[in-house]
DNA sequence: CAGCATCCGGGTTGATACTG
DNA sequence: CAGTATCAACCCGGATGCTG
């Protein structure tokens, strides 16, 4: 039996994002952000304004929203359209690059929503397992 | 007409993970973690030992590895198999639930790796845009 | 080898106030 | 409305030392 970890394979073997120095790691960390995971699919609807995003994504602060959007813009996933009006009117939209990622991200969102029952059940199960002996103290 | 339903299902409208109170948000935040994004696909290869993961995933500390694995276990995505041997031997594997998520997560990893050039290019472009006039002073 | 407890520095986040 | 600036609080995450 070869107990060696086989790296390369057609089906699923993960890529080499595991290398700390690889740029893909940095990109991955951009994606591994709770606001990114919410904002990206939200933009699939089409150009959205700042205020609309604020209202849509409950719990996000103005600071984090802008910050995340900037980061996404910097990485070419989102485009910012400033109409130069007064009062200000700015719209955010997915770029082609962003769209290709938003599809994958949306799947995660859907997964999260679709598997709430299973996860909840697992948590309950885990609690039980963790406390097999409720410390009978003394008799 | 069934068409409308099909369109809604496969097209983009994001789900209601946007509600702060919805459990899916909590689940999403579990996913929105850089180590989760690396560990999950890593387990697709089959049961893996702690040490192997440490070596595979560069830069992860023992603490974060265990911590993340615990969290994944708690949520029913990963199963922990302790062989009760000495020296200790523990293996981690995906549950069915975890497997279904790992597929989606792996796509993100692949995306990150596949789009390095585009992202790099976008960053360069962004830098230029941010500094349109490098203050040429006078000619 | 697997994993926990502890300490602690710093990055990240939220609140608030302010601008155009 | 969109966005910045500032500050304090917090939590994350690394390092270390110890256990079985």
Image (tube, coloured by chain):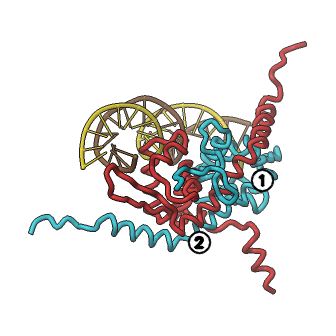
Chain colours: A cyan, B red, C brown, D yellow
Element assignment for label 2: helix
Query: Could you tell me how far apart the alpha carbons at marks 2 and 1 are, in whole angstroms?
Result: 25 Å
**For mark 1, what is the residue?**
A94
The chain under label 2 reads: A
Question: For residue B114, which numbered disc appears in the image?
Answer: none
- Mark sitting earlier along the chain (2/1): 1
Same-subunit check for callouts 2 and 1: yes
Horizontally, residue B109 falls left or right of residue A91, namely left
Residue B31 at x, y = what percent? 56, 57
- The N terminus of chain B is located in which quarter? bottom right
Could you say which is closer to the camera, residue A68 or residue A91?
A68
Quarter of image, res A74:
top right
Q: Residues within 10 Å of mark 1 (few under 14, many from 20)?
A: many
- The C terminus of chain B is located in which quarter? top right
Judge whether residue A52 can be spotted in this image: no
**For mark 2, what is the residue?**
A114
Q: Residue at x 62, y 59 (%)?
A: A57
Would you place residue D3 above or below residue A34 in this image? Answer: above
Quarter of image, res B7:
bottom right
The chain under label 1 reads: A
């Amino acid at each position: 039996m070869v107990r060696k970890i086989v790296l390369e394979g057609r089906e699923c073997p993960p890529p080499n994002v595991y290398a700390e120095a690889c740029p893909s790691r940095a990109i991955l960390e951009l994606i591994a952000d709770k606001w990114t995971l919410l904002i990206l699919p939200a933009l699939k609807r089409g150009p959205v304004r700042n205020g609309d995003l604020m209202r849509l994504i409950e719990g996000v602060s103005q600071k984090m929203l802008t910050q995340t959007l900037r980061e996404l813009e910097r990485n070419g996933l989102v485009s910012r359209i400033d109409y130069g009006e007064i009062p200000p009117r700015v719209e955010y939209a997915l770029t082609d690059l962003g769209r290709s990622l938003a599809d994958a991200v949306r799947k995660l969102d859907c997964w999260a929503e679709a598997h709430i029952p299973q996860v909840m059940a697992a948590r309950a199960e885990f609690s039980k397992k963790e406390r097999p002996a409720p410390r009978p103290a003394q008799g």
